[in-house]
Structure formats: C-alpha cells, structure tokens
Amino acid sequence: MSMMLRVRMPLSTWRVAVVSSSPLQFPQGRRRPFILAGTVLASVALIVLAFTQTLYWFSLMFLLLSVANNMILAPCAALLPDLVPADQRGG
C-alpha cells in the first residue's frame, strides 16, 4: 500500500502542477509561485526529515519531499519554453 502511494502521489503531482500552473496568472508569472511553494515544502520536509525518529514520520516527510520535488521540477520544465524566444528554440 505505501509503495503504491509512494509511486502514484508524485506522478499525479507532476500533472497537477503543470496543468494548474498553465491557466493561472500571478504577478510573478504563471510558474514561479509553484516553484516557490515547492521549494518551501521541500525545505520543511528536509528539516523535519533530519530530526525524525520514527518510520512513520520518515515515510511521511519522504512522501512530502517527493511531492515538493515534483512541484519544483514540473513548472521549471514548463518555464523554459516560456523564457526562450521562439526563434531560438530547437525544432
């Protein structure tokens, strides 16, 4: 059960982060708030992970770290084409 959750949760986060960041408009841009939120979550997860003493908290923080990592990577991958001019993109 936990292994299935460990695999499915980050994969679904990738889709949610990309799909939800595309139509939204923030003053900082469409992708950057998701990158910032993922960075904060990953930092919290790593700090708690360093001091955890039970397997339950370790598993929970590792899952949160995986979700936060995908919250960072998915918008970063979508941000690059937004920043590169169309004539400089590979095709």
Image (spheres, rainbow, N blue to C red):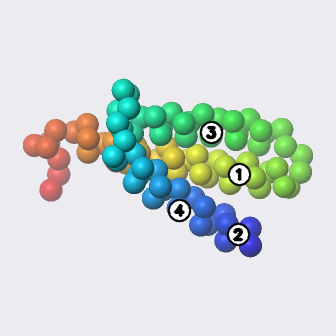
First reached walking from the N terminus: tag 3 or tag 4: 4
User: Label 4 neighbourhood size at 10 Å, few (<14), some (14-19), many (20+)?
Assistant: some
**Disc 4 designates what residue?**
11
Q: Amino acid at mark 2?
A: Met
**Disc 3 designates what residue?**
41
User: Label 1 neighbourhood size at 10 Å, few (<14), some (14-19), many (20+)?
Assistant: some
**Disc 2 designates what residue?**
3
Question: Which residue lies at the image location 77% right of the left edge and 43% below the top edge?
Answer: 49
Mark 2 near mark 3, Cβ–Cβ under 8 Å? no
Q: Residue furthest left?
A: 87
The kind of secondary structure element at disc 1 is helix
Name the mark on residue 62: 1
Left-right relation of 34 to 67 = left
Q: How far is mark 2 from mark 4, CA to CA?
A: 13 Å
First reached walking from the N terminus: tag 1 or tag 3: 3
Q: Position of residue 47 (x, y in %)?
A: 74, 35
First reached walking from the N terminus: tag 2 or tag 1: 2
Q: Position of residue 2 (x, y in %)?
A: 74, 67
Question: Which residue lies at the image location 59% right of the left edge and 66% below the top edge?
Answer: 8
Q: How far is mark 1 from mark 4, CA to CA?
A: 14 Å
User: Label 2 neighbourhood size at 10 Å, few (<14), some (14-19), many (20+)?
Assistant: few
First reached walking from the N terminus: tag 1 or tag 4: 4
The kind of secondary structure element at disc 3 is helix
Q: Amino acid at mark 1?
A: Phe
User: Which of the 4 image quadrants contains residue 45?
Assistant: top right
